[in-house]
Amino acid sequence: MNSEMSAGGKVEMIFDEAKRIGLTSLPFAIAYIALLAGGSTLVDAMAWNTGGDLLINIASLILSYMLVKFMIEKSGIAPDGLLNGFGTYFGIALLSGFGTVLGILLLVIPGLILMIRWSAAYGYGLAGGHGATEALGESWRATEGHWLSVGMALLVPFTAFVIGLGVYFLSIDEFGVVNVPLSGLGNAMMSLGTVLSTAIGLAVYSLTASPVEEMVDVFE
């Protein structure tokens, strides 16, 4: 690969690397989707409201960290193992989540740009050894001039998440009664979107931080 590669060619390489990373942790990815979708659907069906939502949010945070950890370790993109742990993950999740949501609420486009430019932050934080703010900065630097190809790749998980969100809302009628099968499908699609976006984000990290020349050349 060289600097003359088209955006489509870069997207293809991102997908190939994301597929490799995802397959190394496939059993856990499946368990992640099943546990979060099942737990969220149970909370909806039992109408546990605030307490149930809080429990799901805590479980989601822990399981999402484990998902990133498994993908990094199993895929070999961190030869020296994880250099940072949950604290860095939480810091990145908090800062990027707040920034992205704020950007979307204000003008939408800024939030989407932040989501694209910060997509590789977990890799730079956990595998690269940077602190939360440094990891966000490194991800911003790494995606400089390549937002189109990264954004095109992220369209897949984004679409899965939006479809899941739509199905989820359709599962609740005007009386607040939950259609359990629809709720389960919606929650599963949203969890799948998270798995796919995690793999793509780590793929962007792998292709920009790897010492392997043919990978680095893609984004130079």
Image: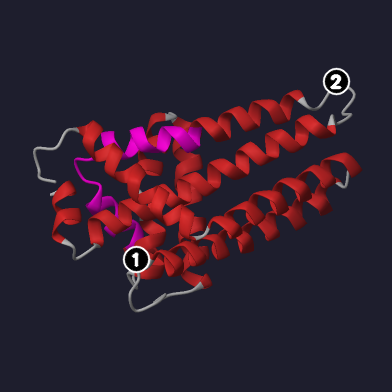
Instruction: Where is residue 110? Give x, y as percent.
Output: 38, 35
Q: Which residue is mark 2?
A: 174
- For the residue pair 190 and 87, the one nearer the viewer reads as 190
Q: Which residues are magenta?
A: 135-158
Q: How are the colours assigned in the image? A: secondary structure
Q: Residue at image x 69%, y 59%?
A: 59
Asked whether, in this view, residue 167 is left or right of residue 203, the answer is right
Residue marked by disc 1: 77
Could you tell me if residue 147 is visible in this image? no
Do we see residue 174 in this rendering?
yes
Q: Residue at x 49, y 67 (%)?
A: 69
Image quarter of residue 31: bottom right
Looking at the picture, how far across and down is residue 202, in whole percent?
38, 55
Residue at left 41%, top 69%?
126
Judge left or right: residue 141 versus residue 133.
left
Task: Identify the residue at the far top of this view.
Answer: 174
Residue 210 at x, y percent in the picture = 23, 63
Task: Give the amino acid at mark 1.
Answer: Ile
Report the number of numbered marks.
2
Q: Is residue 188 above or below residue 94?
A: above
Query: Residue visible at 57% across and 35% down?
Result: 161
Q: Which circle marks residue 196 in the picture?
A: none
